[in-house]
Amino acid sequence: MAILEVRDLEVCYGVIQAIKGISFTVNQGEIIALIGANGAGKTTTLQTITGLIPAKAGRIIYNGTDITKTPGYKLVSMGIAHVPEGRRVFAEMTVLQNLRMGAYTRKDKAEVDETLKSIYQRFPRLEERKNQPAGTLSGGEQQMLAMGRALMSRPKLMLMDEPSMGLSPIYVNEIFDIIKEIHKSGTTVLLVEQNAKKALSIADKAYVLETGRIVLSGDAREMMDNEQVKKAYLSE
Amino acid sequence: MSFLSYFISGVSLGAVYAIIALGYTMVYGIARMLNFAHGDVIMVGSFVIFTVVSTFGMNPFIGIAAGVLACTLLGVTVERIAYRPLREATSLAVLITAIGVSYFLQNVALLIFGSNAHQFTSVVSLPNLVLAGGNLTVSSTAIVTIISCIIIMIALTAFINKTKMGQAMLAVSEDRGAASLMGIDVNKTIAVTFAIGSALAAIAGALLCSAYPSLTPYTGSMPGIKAFTAAVFGGIGSIPGALIGGIVLGVIENLSKAYISSQLSDAIVFAVLIIVLLVRPTGILGRKINEKV
């Protein structure tokens, strides 16, 4: 069953068209990877889904509801969480305050505390540093915080934008393990990555974006063997 | 003793600046705009209080409540009509709009109340405090002003740190986009910020006009600019900065009036601002500006 459907989406920055009519589907329980080079439109796609940028044309359907024009802040309570590019944690707020912000739309106080506990279990380092301003964390820890913050809303669909960007290889592996865990616990994942090798290794299906168009789509494992993909995105 | 007396009235004047500066600093911190009409909201609040208390002869507390209510509505309405449509516009467009709103409010007041000064009846009717065997008199208005300022600072700090809306304000002030990804309605948060700032402006108006009772449509503009200066001085966007900036400014202004020249006092105040900004461009408690690439 499709949890998210993007149909003929077009997005413009002024006169420049960043997304030129893309369509893709995310099914319940999948990990979908959007890969492509810098400037291909991956981040723009995610930001349009969560309402940070308005769509010029096309439709975005989430669980059967058209959310193309829904203000972004309303999507959180509908079950969409977005871990943005560059993490964008609230640097001057503490780790705990950041996590609490993630639960902003939830009213069930006791259950929020339960979720917080489970996030501390998944990311023990966040608990150790809970009273520290988020700006003092390392890049990898900030990425964990951004993910934990998104999980605080108990999302059905999680959009992740370049979670491995700027991280050391050890952290990259750790982050991808966590994505697998999040997926295993029942959250559907739409993953945007420049690290195509890593992304394809955990994804079910993948779409390759090039200058605002989807040029290739298919099973993630098959794509790893695709000569074209190997040449353009998998060469180290 | 006269120094102490000048100093205390300086602190009291500074407390009024600090309350006004909160409006500037919160709106700047959260909406990233300079609301140059904020000073005129003080004037509107003062006229509302003046009308309720002096014209209709009602209790000053009812007057203040009416002023707070009127300014809150005014602040939210101005934000909705004049500023929200410019959310994505350049800051210059917003700034010019704010100046336009300022002239608009002044001229509406001019139409209704005329340009003659109205005698504002003090909202404080307590006896003055006489200390040191009659050598030092502290006006009750000054005491009430300083206490009000302290209460407002404590309440506001608690609101920001302890409530969900306060935390949402912090989040919006740091990163509007990320805040919206948390499910925070950024427009509503900004509207609440305007409501709080404007309500405080009404209180500042009541205290200011109780100390300086001549009320005209231009009453708000000079204190508005001074409070803006105080906000920048303390570090715009910072609430404790507004307090420190306001008090320092009020004390400098009063002491230079007393010991140097009453004509030059404003010049001295702004000269100090220029010097502080040359040494510390972000103000005393300002955030460091980290432009991340």
Image (cartoon, rainbow, N blue to C red):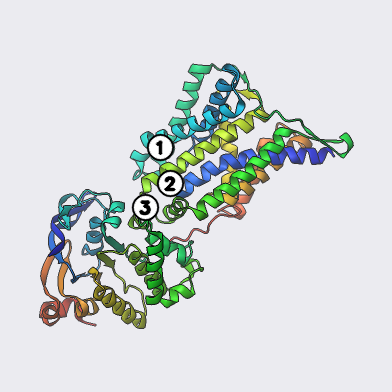
**Residue A27 coordinates in the image, percent (x, y):** 15, 67
- Mark 1, residue position: B79
Earlier in the chain: of badge 3 and badge 2, it is 2
Same subunit, labels 2 and 1: the answer reads yes
Residue at 38% x, 53% y: name it: B176
**Residue B205 coordinates in the image, percent (x, y):** 59, 32
Instruction: Inspect the image, locate mark 3, and give the three-letter code of the amino acid beneath it.
Output: Ile
Side of B158 relative to B108 (left or right)? right
Give SS at disc 3: loop
Q: CA distance from mark 2 to mark 1?
A: 10 Å
**Chain at tag 2:** B
**Which of the two marks, 3 or 2, is nearer to us in this view?**
3
Give SS at disc 2: helix
Side of A207 relative to B244 (left or right)? left
Q: Is residue B78 above or below residue A53?
A: above
User: Quadrant where the C terminus of chain B lies?
Assistant: bottom left
Circle 1 Cα neighbour tier, 10 Å, few/some/many (<14 / 14–19 / ≥20):
many
Q: CA distance from mark 3 to mark 1?
A: 18 Å
Question: Which image quarter: residue A210?
Answer: bottom left
Earlier in the chain: of badge 2 and badge 1, it is 2
Q: Is residue B194 visible?
A: yes
**Chain at tag 1:** B
Instruction: Inspect the image, locate mark 1, and give the three-letter code of the amino acid beneath it.
Output: Glu
- Mark 2, residue position: B31
Side of B28 relative to A74 (left or right)? right
**Which of the two marks, 3 or 1, is nearer to us in this view?**
3
**Residue B273 coordinates in the image, percent (x, y):** 62, 45
Instruction: Inspect the image, locate mark 2, and give the three-letter code of the amino acid beneath it.
Output: Ala
Residues A233 and B43: in front is B43
Side of B161 relative to B119 (left or right)? left
- Mark 3, residue position: B184
Contact check, label 2 and label 1, Cβ < 8 Å = yes
